Image: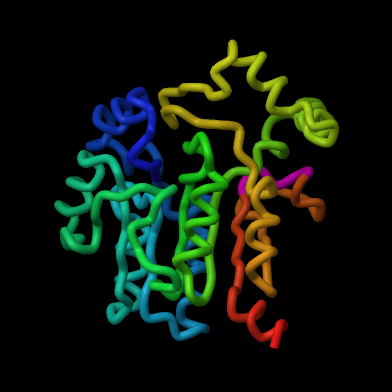
Amino acid sequence: MNTDTSMPSLQRSYYARTADQYEDLHVREHDEHGLALAWLAGLTDHFGASSVLDVGCGTGRALRYLKHRQPNLRITGIEPSAELRAVGHAAGIAEDELVDGDATRLAFADNSFDFVCEFGVLHHLEKPRLAVAEMLRVARVGVFISDDNHFAAGSLVGRRVKQVLNSLGLWKAAYSLRTGGKGYRISEGDGLSYPYSVFTDLDLVRAQCGLVQLASTAEGGPDLYASAAHMAVFGHKHAEAQRRQ
């Protein structure tokens, strides 16, 4: 799942080269995003949602999943990679359901979708906070995020070091130094990625959502920040509106 129209050429090249194998490389039925999708499907059913926007939807995994379970749901996905969109269209997603788009500049009006979601997009963005703000703007009922918590990834010692550096406000500088000033890394398994944590932008969600729920979708203890390397976050906007009344 992917980035915006300004994504680096390295990332574009990666998706163009791996599009035909994308789901084999990135999708497992019961992986972290699969668990998150099951939660999202329950939420859309519970709140009687009629529309969902998936930001950076890749080949359309989430769109197919939701459409299969809720055929009357209006689904829309944006994906800047033409090659990944082509795979999704070939799998049966209509062209007007899977379109080009920019996660940091969503071409939709305020409150135009009941739910706005993303699965593994934010850690590919140089400025993920812009995307989270746009998701909140466009969502009417709530936002759903399934993504990394970099501070809980790696060995116990490595996690502790990252957490201490972050608490001192030194993490970005340390990672930039580690990557020779780039601030990102490139891997065959994930292309270009940044050291993202859902906790970094959680304040934006809490500011607009009266009900915010977090869950680990991978191994983790009770302290999610310190132990859960992959997280799902649900923010309910209506709860905030009701609280203010």
**Up-down relation of residue 91 to residue 149 (above or below):** below
Front one among 230 and 180? 180
Protein image colouring: rainbow
Place of residue 81 in the rendered image (x, y in percent of width and height, measured from the top left): 27, 40
Q: Which residues are magenta?
A: 226-230
Horizontally, residue 56 falls left or right of residue 198, namely left
Q: Residue furthest top?
A: 180
**Up-down relation of residue 63 to residue 140 (above or below):** above
Place of residue 152 in the rendered image (x, y in percent of width and height, measured from the top left): 72, 39
Horizontally, residue 82 falls left or right of residue 3, namely left
Front one among 203 and 145? 203
**Up-down relation of residue 21 to residue 141 (above or below):** above
Horizontally, residue 204 falls left or right of residue 117, namely right
The quadrant in which the C terminus is found is bottom right
Q: Quadrant of residue 112?
A: bottom left
**Up-down relation of residue 173 to residue 128 (above or below):** above
Horizontally, residue 164 falls left or right of residue 62, namely right
Q: Quadrant of residue 9?
A: top left
Q: Residue at position x 36%, y 47% from top?
A: 102
How many tags in the picture?
0
Q: Residue at position x 53%, y 63% from top?
A: 136
Place of residue 25 in the rendered image (x, y in percent of width and height, measured from the top left): 37, 36
The quadrant in which the N terminus is found is top left
Place of residue 132 in the rendered image (x, y in percent of width and height, measured from the top left): 54, 54
Q: Residue at position x 33%, y 62% from top?
A: 63
Q: Residue at position x 85%, y 31% from top?
A: 168
